[in-house]
Image: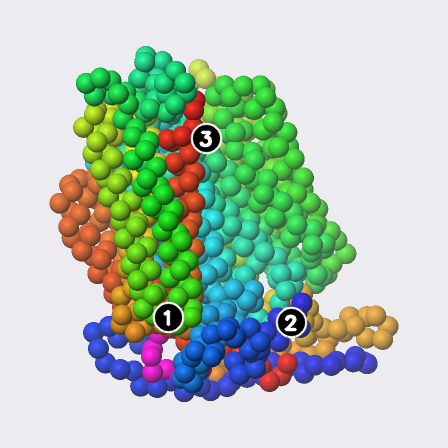
């Protein structure tokens, strides 16, 4: 173990094994690009010189995401507890109809219809999940040095995230108009806090995506820094996975 | 003596790298690392560690004065020193200060100063984030204390049970300051935890596998993991409280069906790991001190590490023993009783291992050793009274009495704080280049130990007699007068002990200035890597990155076994330590932006409490700090430091990895 560590951290760049080079890419690359791929490869490994072999930045993101699990864990527990405790359900304000379908708490609305619009939220959920795919495509593009498609996929990812946020803003406005506000009751407080925290996380993710785009435009982010995109991607996928949980628990769970 | 040695014992000294001229520009990083102004921009983990230490000692005096005020009030029946309302504020702020503004930052001081040194690194993984952690903590600490002048301090107790914290029952701004102040301090802890975890996992010197790390490094690492997972839980709890108080949410509004128990759960899911966050650093410190002054390796190293990790894990499964009186239900109470009893096992393993380390050792009762022995004795008493809380019927009797107050002061003062003082005396020569006076150190120790037992020992009796905590006064007929008198007298003895420490610091510094004595790199004949470099630690830590072969590698460079298996000296520290003479080692540049960014946080706090108009300057400051941080060159672009320049990767502060280059690779 110790010998491996020592060898690892003292190995000069030139001696890095290039067996892992993406051979398939070589034929279509010019000599200059090939050189670029070599450096890209080296830097993309990140973390040579670190003890674990994972770069500091990536390890930081993993640690942060671990912490985020507890953050959303506390929020989701709060929501579940308050959904149970919300006595309005017993008075016919239940978010579920006789068949156990989630129709949202019935506030306002002339016919007493629920505030949840499951089809609408389902569509925006799929849009958000789709953005994970475009995120992967963006990462793979910058790794291969295909900058045009990197730009397209990064902007697409940010756009899909923005559509999700727009949908959330629309949904929130609808709910408030129908009478379910942040301070209406404990269900409202718990619902808006949980989904709101998630919305803020998506927004921060969009800012990070735009920042990678701008940095790339300025020439500060190329294939040799592909790891930065990977780290933004880790965050983005995490936020998506959390939404799968929230969507299931808040909108789909029968009581 | 015939010792076969297959490596050169002496550590290689100075290699020189050249730093190029810096380009001019608005975003050029500040350069100076000397003078008072440099402290505001420093990213050096040692300076940040010292600032944490000074800050925590300052607030220790603050919290101490609050404690004395409480004790004056309670010294005799029907005390009139403080009004009821002021009394509530004082005991709340005493608790908040001692936990969040004293013990935690004091542990952060040791973590910042020592972790990189003990793993053989040049700095932490993210030096600017490290500076941000400190300024953020200080901003939060000052923000909390400004509440005294802005309508009253928090008055809901340090664990702030709902619904006492609602606007109805706490109409002043105090609890808002509590919620937002702790939020800011929490950001500091979280950022610092992530930073230090990455540092320990990723920046160890060649050869330092996990099981060769010093016990202090291990305990601090476990602490950082506890912080990493505990802070977000209280973050949410504090958000819910702020939402309730400032934005009309209903989380703890009982009339709307809100659940006060939710606060208790969230608080203690954070709060119990927090207890271990407070104590594990002290455990780590005395695990360095005791082997050094027993001249033996730590007994059962893997068990010491393993029991620390076990405490870290089990600390998550015992929180509800704080809530036995709240009617959790039999099964929960039984389960948490059991888990609470089990957690005494790894703690007991540690105590026995310290004793076994001392057993048969050649003991030197220096001041740090005395404090360490104090920790073992006092923490054992606190640990035993803790086990009585695991017995639910007994705990129900003790809840909210002075018995509880006695218990947690025995673990937090008798464990954590005495441990930190042991650390102060032990590492003082490494940090400042001179020892603290042994004479004053012993006065300090005995005053503190005697005062401590006078103060908190009788509280057990008072608690069992039924004296409830947090009561403003008691009547003569209650019969609590005698012991309360002793307790209050003891509190002043502790104050004298603290004074002795301050006198010691002042006198020793003056002495060192008048007749400087060379302490040498390793005045205690210690064991871990920080002692293998000059005292005070040079700005670049190590001239050459050390290569580690053994646990306690530095000790193995000095001592070895001869043919008869007898331990004999191989070399003297002065001859083999690095002399710190390397110049121009490339180090991360200082930065203004951590300070700017952290200043915006209390402003955001004030805007939530007082007027949203303040959000405009606060937001502007935040944006300025954020953008300045992102746009300044994360490292000097002209600086020649080899291949791996992650410098421009501005979202993430990557300075130090690239910089801690392996200059000494050739001697592998």
Q: Is residue A187 left or right of residue A35?
A: left
Residue B557: x %, y % from top left: 68, 75
Q: Where is A141 relative to B88, above or below?
A: below
Within 10 Å of the Cα at label 3, are there few (<14), some (14-19), or many (20+) other Cα atoms? some
Question: Is residue B507 or residue B359 the one in the foreground?
Answer: B359
Structural distance between the alpha carbons of marks 1 and 2? 35 Å
From the image, tell me which residue sits under label 2. A4
Q: Evaluate whether label 1 is on the same chain as label 2.
A: yes
Q: Is residue B531 left or right of residue B593?
A: right
Is residue B640 magenta-colored? yes
Q: Where is B41 relative to B534, above or below?
A: above
Within 10 Å of the Cα at label 2, are there few (<14), some (14-19), or many (20+) other Cα atoms? few
Structural distance between the alpha carbons of marks 3 and 2? 45 Å
Query: Looking at the magenta stretch, what is its main secondary structure?
Result: loop
Q: Where is B305 relative to B343, above or below?
A: below
Dot 1: what SS?
loop
Instruction: Please state, as top left, top right, bottom left or bottom right, where the N terminus of chain A lies in the image.
Output: bottom right
Indicate which disc residue B265 carries.
3
- Decide which of tag 1 and tag 2 comes sooner along the chain: 2
Q: Residue at x 35, y 41 (%)?
A: A125
Q: Residue at x 43, y 78 (%)?
A: A28
Residue B72: quarter of image: top left
Residue B477: x %, y % from top left: 44, 15
Indicate which disc residue A146 carries.
1
Instruction: Please state, as top left, top right, bottom left or bottom right, where the C terminus of chain A lies in the image.
Output: top left
Dot 3: what SS?
helix
Q: Is residue B388 visible?
A: no
Residue B532: x %, y % from top left: 58, 73
Which span is picked out in magenta?
Answer: B635-644
């Amino acid at each position: 173990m110790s010998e491996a560590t020592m060898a690892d951290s003292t190995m000069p760049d030139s001696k890095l094994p290039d067996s892992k080079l993406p051979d398939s890419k070589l034929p279509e690359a010019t000599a200059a690009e090939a050189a670029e791929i070599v450096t890209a490869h080296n830097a993309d490994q990140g973390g040579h010189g670190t003890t674990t072999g994972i770069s500091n930045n990536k390890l930081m993101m993993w640690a942060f995401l671990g912490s985020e699990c507890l953050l959303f864990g506390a929020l989701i527990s709060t929501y579940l507890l308050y959904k149970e405790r919300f006595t309005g359900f017993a008075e016919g304000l239940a978010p579920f109809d006789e068949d156990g379908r989630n129709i949202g708490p019935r506030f306002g609305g002339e016919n007493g219809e629920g505030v949840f619009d499951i089809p609408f939220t389902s569509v925006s959920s799929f849009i958000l999940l789709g953005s994970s795919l475009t995120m992967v495509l963006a990462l793979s593009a910058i790794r291969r040095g295909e900058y045009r498609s990197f730009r397209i996929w990064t902007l697409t990812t940010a756009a899909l995230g923005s559509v999700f946020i727009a949908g959330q803003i629309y949904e929130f406005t609808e709910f408030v108009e129908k009478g379910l506000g942040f301070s209406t009751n404990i269900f409202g407080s718990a619902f808006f806090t949980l989904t709101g925290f998630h919305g803020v996380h998506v927004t921060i993710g969009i800012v990070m995506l735009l920042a990678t785009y701008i940095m790339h435009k300025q020439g500060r982010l190329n294939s040799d820094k592909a790891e930065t995109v990977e780290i933004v991607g880790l965050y983005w996928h995490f936020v998506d996975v959390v939404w799968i949980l929230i969507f299931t628990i808040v909108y789909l769970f029968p009581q | 003596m015939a010792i076969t040695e297959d490596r050169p014992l002496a550590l290689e000294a100075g290699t020189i790298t050249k730093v190029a001229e810096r380009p001019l520009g608005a975003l050029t990083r500040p350069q100076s690392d000397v003078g008072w102004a440099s402290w505001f921009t420093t990213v050096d983990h040692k300076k940040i560690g010292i600032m944490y230490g000074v800050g925590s000692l300052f607030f220790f005096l603050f919290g101490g004065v609050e404690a004395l005020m409480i004790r004056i009030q309670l010294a005799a029946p029907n005390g009139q020193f403080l009004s009821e309302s002021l009394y509530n504020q004082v005991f709340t702020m005493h608790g908040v200060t001692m936990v969040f503004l004293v013990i935690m930052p004091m542990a952060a001081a040791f973590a910042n100063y020592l972790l990189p040194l003990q793993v053989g690194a040049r700095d932490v993984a993210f030096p600017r984030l490290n500076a941000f952690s400190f300024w953020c903590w200080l901003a939060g600490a000052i923000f909390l204390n400004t509440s005294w002048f802005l309508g009253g301090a928090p008055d809901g107790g340090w664990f702030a049970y709902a619904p006492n914290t609602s606007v109805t029952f706490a109409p002043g701004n105090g609890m808002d300051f509590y919620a937002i102040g702790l939020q800011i301090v929490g950001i500091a802890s979280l950022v610092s935890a992530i930073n230090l975890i990455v540092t320990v996992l990723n920046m160890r010197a060649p050869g330092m596998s996990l099981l060769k790390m010093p016990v202090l490094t291990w305990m601090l690492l476990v602490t950082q993991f506890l912080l990493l997972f505990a802070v977000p839980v209280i973050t949410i709890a504090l958000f819910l409280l702020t939402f309730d108080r400032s934005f009309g949410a209903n989380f703890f509004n009982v009339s709307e069906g809100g659940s006060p128990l939710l606060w208790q759960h969230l608080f203690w899911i954070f709060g119990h790991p927090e207890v271990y966050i407070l104590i594990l650093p002290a455990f780590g410190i005395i695990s360095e001190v005791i082997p050094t002054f027993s001249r033996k390796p730590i007994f059962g190293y893997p068990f010491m590490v393993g029991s620390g990790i076990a405490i870290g894990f089990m600390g998550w499964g015992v929180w509800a023993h704080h809530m036995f009186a709240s009617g959790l239900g039999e099964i929960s109470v039984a389960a948490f009783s059991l888990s609470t009893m089990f957690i005494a096992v790894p703690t007991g393993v540690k105590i026995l291992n310290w004793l076994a380390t001392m057993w048969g050792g050649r003991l030197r009762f220096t001041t740090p050793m005395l404090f360490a022995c104090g920790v073992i004795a006092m923490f054992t008493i606190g640990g035993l009274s803790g086990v009585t809380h695991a017995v639910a019927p007994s705990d129900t009797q003790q809840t909210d009495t002075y018995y509880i107050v006695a218990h947690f002061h025995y673990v937090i003062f008798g464990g954590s704080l005495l441990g930190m003082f042991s650390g102060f005396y032990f590492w003082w020569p490494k940090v400042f280049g001179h020892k603290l006076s042994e004479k004053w150190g012993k006065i300090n120790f005995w005053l503190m130990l005697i005062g401590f037992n006078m103060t908190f020992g009788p509280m057990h009796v008072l608690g069992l007699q039924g004296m409830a905590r947090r009561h403003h006064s008691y009547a003569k007929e209650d019969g609590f007068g005698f012991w309360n008198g002793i307790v209050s007298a003891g509190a002043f003895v502790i104050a004298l002990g603290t004074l002795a420490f301050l006198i010691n610091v002042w006198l020793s510094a003056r002495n060192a200035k008048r007749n400087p004595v060379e302490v040498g790199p390793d005045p205690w004949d210690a064991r871990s890597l920080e002692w293998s470099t000059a005292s005070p630690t040079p700005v670049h830590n190590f001239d050459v990155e050390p290569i580690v072969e053994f646990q306690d590698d530095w000790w193995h460079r000095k001592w070895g076994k001869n043919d008869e298996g007898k331990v004999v000296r191989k070399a003297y520290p002065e001859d083999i330590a690095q002399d710190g003479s390397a110049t121009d080692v490339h180090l991360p540049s200082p930065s203004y932006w951590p300070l700017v960014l952290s200043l915006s946080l209390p402003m955001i706090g004030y805007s939530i409490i007082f007027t949203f108009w303040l959000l405009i300057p606060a937001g502007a400051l935040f944006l300025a700090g954020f953008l300045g941080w992102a746009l300044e060159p994360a490292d000097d672009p002209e600086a020649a430091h080899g291949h791996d320049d992650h410098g421009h990767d501005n979202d993430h502060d990557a300075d130090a990895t690239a910089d801690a280059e392996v200059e000494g690779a050739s001697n592998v």
